[in-house]
Amino acid sequence: MNLEEKAASGDRLSIARLLTMIESGTPRGLDALDVLYSKSGRAHLIGITGPSGSGKSTLVNRLALELAGKPSDDLNVAIIAIDPTSPFSGGALLGDRVRMRDLADRPDIFIRSMATRGALGGLARTASEAAMLLDAVGFPYILIETVGAGQSEVDIARLAHTTVVIEAPGLGDDVQAGKAGILEIADILVVNKSDKPDADAAAHSLAAMLEIGEELRTGYSTKPRWKTPILMASALNGEGITELADVIRSHRSFLDESGEWKKRGEARVRELFERLLREKLFNDWTAKINQDDYEAVIDRISKREISPRKALADYLKS
Amino acid sequence: MDRKIRVLIAKPGLDGHDRGAKIIARALRDAGMEVIYTGLRQTPEMIASAVLQEDVDVVGLSILSGAHMTLVPRVLDLMKANGQGETPVFVGGIIPEEDAAQLAALGVKAVYGPGTATTRVIDDVMNFVSQA
């Protein structure tokens, strides 16, 4: 059996090796995706995002157990846990496993840590391809935990079918919540650390923010709509996790029935294809150009002799 | 292509002193590596499973409890059973010389005592990877 066949039959080492190849962008890894792509498209991709310190990893730890059910040799839940790459050294400290201890001896749960490697939207550069592989080898649930996200790390909403935004009391006032980005992408909103005294107040101000958004949107949409629920949870004490898993499953039913599942899938494929196209065109083009000419253009722009936009127009003409 | 060195730093056993492990993790990160840190009180099974899923290039074990002669061979055995017997492993901690020799005989690439310069660990890890 080759690596793809072994991975598709559930061999953990083959899955892990392919993930490394895909993450490194080796031809071997990309070929594997070509082979396995037809098997993908079945997994439920669930994004978990929220500010640093809101308890994402702890919640993922509990949620994965809840979704996986009884331990078995099947592939039940895959987790992609993302932490930032240092902009200075290019290295990364990937520490999400520290809070996922309960999953460490579960053969049916597969955790993979990824560094962002320069991507800015809260995901790893190859998170989408990694999810595709985990989908193709048969994991029914894929949890994607983003880096600590605030107002603009919203790429997860384009990758996941269901986006769970975690907030915790004491991380910001309701104006912060209104600045949006992250709240707008929530299919499910979780107020974690519900044991803290100001949790109810946090849930209240989030509910008010969501309501404003709902009212502003109803005017121009007639589609069946999903109303973002707000759940209270304490990941540390395991409270509210069963409810969260239930709501995630009902969101999936909503996606299926409303046609959104298919629509989100198409949007993801389009985005992926466009990204590949951009990268390919750019790389082919950079391979062809004269580096000295290119540097000369950059030099003229930085000396303010020509604007970037004008320089580009001239450059592409020549 | 963007091949980064991936290292797993784990603390098997029951001692709660993770300063050394954290310093090494940070030093390797600052040297441009991706370091997966698994936290305290890991069983050999948990470590081997993390090594498998993360497909790391190098494994570092930090042990200050004195139980290295039981814990390290167990991790090595489990890694071998998972098909990762070739993955380089180093050990940090307070390890008597005769134990260090035995660990080396079992295949441990390097043993670092207290006060080891982080630059040495970084250089070694890079060498392990280029030899592999």
Image: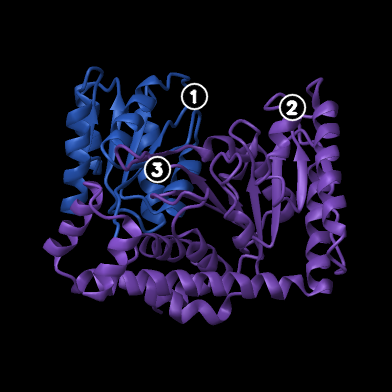
Q: Chain B is drawn in which colour?
A: blue
Which class describes the residues within 10 Å of circle 3: few (<14), some (14-19), or many (20+)?
many
Q: Closer to the observer: label 1 or label 2?
A: 2
Residue A10 visible from this viewpoint? no
Q: How far apart are marks 3 and 2 (CA)?
A: 27 Å
A257 to the left or right of A187: right
Tell me the kind of residue under disc 2. Pro
Figure quadrant of the C terminus of chain A: bottom left
Q: Closer to the observer: label 1 or label 3?
A: 3
Tell me the element at label 1: loop
Tell me the kind of residue under disc 3. Thr
Which class describes the residues within 10 Å of circle 1: few (<14), some (14-19), or many (20+)?
some
Tell me the element at label 3: loop
A281 to the left or right of A161: left
Q: Which chain is purple?
A: A
Query: Where is mark 1, residue-wise?
Result: B14
Figure quadrant of the N terminus of chain A: bottom left
A244 or B43, which is in the foreground? A244
Q: Which chain carries label 2?
A: A
- On whether disc 1 and disc 3 are found on a single subunit, the reply is no
Q: Residue A85 carries which label?
A: 3
A241 to the left or right of A163: right
Toward which corner of the image does residue B115 lie, by quadrant?
top left
Tell me the kind of residue under disc 1. Leu
* Residue drawn at point x = 86 percent, y = 45 percent: A211
* Residue drawn at point x = 30 percent, y = 65 percent: A312
Q: Which mark is residue A169?
A: 2
